[in-house]
Image (cartoon, rainbow, N blue to C red):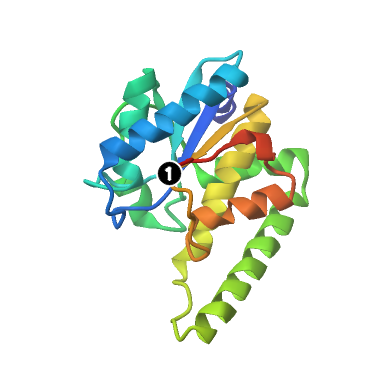
Amino acid sequence: MKADLLNRLADYHPVVIEGMGGYDPREPAEVAAQVATRLQAHWQQSPSSKPRLLIIQGDPLEARGIAAITPRVAARFGLGRALVCLDESIAAYHARDADRHNVILEYRYSQLEEVLRSHDQGVIPRLEAAVDQAIHERNRRRHALGKPPLKDWFRDFALLQEVTKAASRRLCGGITVAHTASDISEFSVTSFYRVGLELGLLDATDIVSYGR
């Protein structure tokens, strides 16, 4: 059954949108419109041979931020959504609280982690080590700025983000990743997209910048 579910994902071209959570002060409809414009231009230059599917990562429904932006982008292009959540053993609340509107496929982190392990047993240790090093460097900078260290959950969500993209790209033979802002804070989970790039799990041509 799990293999069948993963095979269903492989029938699509995955689309991942990354950005700020509910603390984003901007009007989500305006941000979604800009993201959609950038995606449209990207797909005109690099069309996909498969139907597109928006991949979301367990954000609960909120009035602003990524959880308010992704449904608008999905509606703009008529996309279904796939949901990837942390396993209950990692964060019991994550799948429980996730928005499931228009979700047609659902996975757990461990399933996509196994996709990567099946191709390369060393990829997850390398990714974990790179994320740990990046968190260490960020905490060093935060200390110098008089800021507290990043919360413990930060690591789990950085790994969820990068594993989701890498496994989806591996399964589907491609991916589109769009950002909801041009200025990405180094202390955000979104900023860890650079880790995926450095490890070769993503390519720069996969990424659609926000523009403006």
The quadrant of the rendering that contains the C terminus is top left
- Left or right of 103 on screen, residue 161: right
Kind of residue sitting beneath label 1: Thr
Q: Residue furthest left?
A: 63
Residue 138 falls in image quadrant = bottom right
Q: Say which element carries label 1.
A: loop
Position of 119 relative to 86 (above/below)? above
Q: Residue sitting at 42 percent across and 52 percent down?
A: 88
- The residue singled out by tag 1 in the image is 180
**Residue shown at 37%/56% (left/top)?**
92
Q: In the displayed structure, would residue 110 be above or below residue 143? A: above
| Residue 23 visible somewhere in the drawing | yes
Residue 180 in the image: state x and y as whole percent.
43, 44
Which residue in the rendered view is the most extreme toward the front?
Answer: 212
Above or below 201: residue 124: below
Rendering coords of residue 33 (x, y %)? 34, 31
In the image, taking residue 194 as reference, residue 12 lies left or right, namely: left
Report if residue 12 is visible in the image: no
Near-viewer residue (62 or 164) = 62
Q: State the residue in front, 142 or 171.
A: 142
Residue at image position (53%, 64%) is 186
